[in-house]
Structure formats: structure tokens, C-alpha cells
Image (spheres, rainbow, N blue to C red):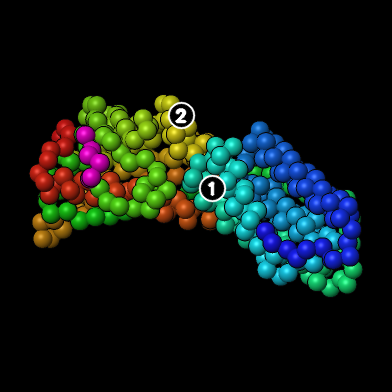
Amino acid sequence: MTSKDLTDDTAPAERRRANWKFVAAMITALAAALAVYLLAEAGSGGAIGYALMVVLPATLTAFVAWAGSARRSWSRTTFLMVPLWLALAATAIGAIFLREGVVCLVMVLPFWIGFGYIGLWPVYLYRRSQRHVDPATFRAHVMLLLPFFALLVDQHIAPPRETRTVASEIIVDAAATTTWSHLLAIPAIASDEGRWNISQDLLRLPRPVAAHLSGTGPGAVRDARWQDDIRFQEIVTEWRPGEALEWRFAFPDPSIHERTDRHIEPHGRHLWVDSGGYHLTPLPDGRTKIRLWTRYHIATPFNGYAAWWGERILGDIQNNVLAIVAGRIDDGRGGGKR
């Protein structure tokens, strides 16, 4: 972060005192942010709430801009860089020290930048309109109490709950009866199968390794294994050969959120991955359209934003699975039980 030096007539001792005051203010801000994070993690409202996503970035940016510009003549560029630097610093701290997953960090980053600028704006306008900048920072510390009050809101107001469905489709050059057998089980998926996508190739979410079927008809279990030793189950609820296969999800161990992102708990307070399935539609030319869908419930203050990410991530995962199935049909490799 750059700024103009203190005025030339400022004594070195006073310059050092101003710098130490700024360092002390930054330590205070970091301690307050960490306290808000830990309280949010431990509370019933969870970490996805107004305190961490909205109020904290706005107040931290305002506080840093106020404390940093005290006894300094900051340029407009310096002010505008504060939200960016803070967002990047929060991302680095979250990744290195708090062990946050890349998906969570990418999702939170736009909030920290956007609301950081909202918090910065009144401070910038005030500093620009004042000929003599108030050097006191103790009044600015009151701003750091705002995220703690926002935590009370998060703890006592239940977020809205919504149900969303993400669906993907592909057309394969095979009849529905042939296609059906390839959907039941997908053993030994090679690393070069499927398709490139942002979620699994850039964000590094795991890819499927195999899916094995135990039993037939409703009650049968598809055991899915993904990279990083991730495991979950799809318990069949509807079995119509050549037409439809549906299931409900079961997560017998915490491997998904332990190895991807601990806030992406598939049966948690913010997200509940409910059910899914394949629907087959025979086409007049002898081909078959496969529709793969997943239904989930979300409960956050930002359901629209979360659902947008759900559409991107689940869409990538589903399209990859469909590409694997289509590739195996083209290669003539067998599937599971009929």
C-alpha cells in the first residue's frame, strides 16, 4: 500500500509515533476480525452470515482507511487500493492459517471487495472534505464493534430456506436400453475420462473414481468414490429400466467437507444435498437423451448468490459425469447390472 510521506516539517519522533499508532491499530483490527470469525464458527448461525460476509469487510476497510490516512495525505489511488489489499490479505490468512478451502475463498472474495468499497466510501468523502485531518484513532475503534452486533443478528434470525435443482443433459448414440446399463455402475474411471471444467480443473475439486452398485431395484445402493478418498452413497428410490433411476444421497462419513471445504457440508445447516437421478428420453433417430439432476436445499442470507455457485459447480460435476458415460457408450465398455 502506498501513501505520501508525512509532511517534511514533521519531527522524526512524531513520525515514529504515528507509524506505531497505525501498527497498533492494524493489530487491533486483526484481533477483532479473528474474534468475529471464531465466534461465528462456534455460534448457531454459522460462518455464512451478515457479520463475516458484509459488516466485517465494510468496517475493517473503513477502520484501516481512517487509521492509515490519519496524519497522512493519502491519494485517491491509495484509498481505492485498501479494499483490494484487505480482501487479498483475508484470502491469504484464510488459506494459510485458517485452512479454508479454495471454493469458500473464491465465493467470499467478491463480498469482501464489494462491501469493502461501501465501507471505504464515507471515509474517503470525509477525508477529502477536511482541510485538517483528525489524527485520533480511538473513535474509529468503535466501528470494530459493529461486526459483533451483526453476529447477534446472525444468531437469532434464521436464514430463508430454498430448494434448488440443477440439471444437465447429453445425447448419446445408443438406445435407451443400452444406455441404462451404463448408468448403473461406472467402475474404474481413468484420469483422462470426462471433460475439462472450471470446478474440477481450476478450483481443484475432486473427480469421480468409481461407482459400484449393490442390489437391484429400490433400496439398491450405489457406492461412489472420488479422488482424495471421498465416499458417499446413492440409495435408489426409483428403478425403471430404460426410463429412470433416482436416489437419495447418504454421507456415511465426513470425507467430503474434510477434504474439500469444511463449510461445504452436504448434510449441514447451510446446505443439504437431497436427491438426484437419471431420466432417459428415447429420440426418433434411435439415440437417447440423458438428463442428470440433483436437488438440494440451501439456507443462507444469500441464497441467490449461493444458488448461482451451485449451478456452476454442480453443473460442471454433472457434465463431467455425463461425458464419462457418453465416452463409455461410444467405446462399448460395459456398465452395471440390468
Name the residue nearer the viewer: 173 or 86: 86
Give the residues in magenta: 188-193
Residue 105: which numbered mark, if any?
A: 1
Residue kind at label 1, given as amino acid type: Leu
Query: Is residue 288 shown in magenta?
Result: no
In the image, 51: left or right of 162? right
At numbered mark 2, what does the secondary structure look like: helix, strand or loop? loop
In the image, 150: left or right of 269? right
- Front label number (1 vs 2): 1
Judged by its main secondary structure, the magenta piece is loop
Quadrant hosting residue 1: bottom right
- Residue 179 coordinates in the image, percent (x, y): 16, 46
Q: Residue at x 80, y 45 (%)?
A: 24
At numbered mark 1, what does the secondary structure look like: helix, strand or loop? helix
The vertical placement of 94 against 258, above or below, is below
How many numbered callouts?
2
- Residue 267 coordinates in the image, percent (x, y): 48, 35
Q: Which residue is denoted by mark 2 in the rendering?
A: 254
Q: Residue at x 27, y 51 (%)?
A: 195
Residue kind at label 2, given as amino acid type: Pro
Q: Residue at x 36, y 30 (%)?
A: 229
Q: Earlier in the sequence, mark 1 or mark 2?
A: 1
Label 2: few (<14), some or many (≥20) within 10 Å? Answer: some
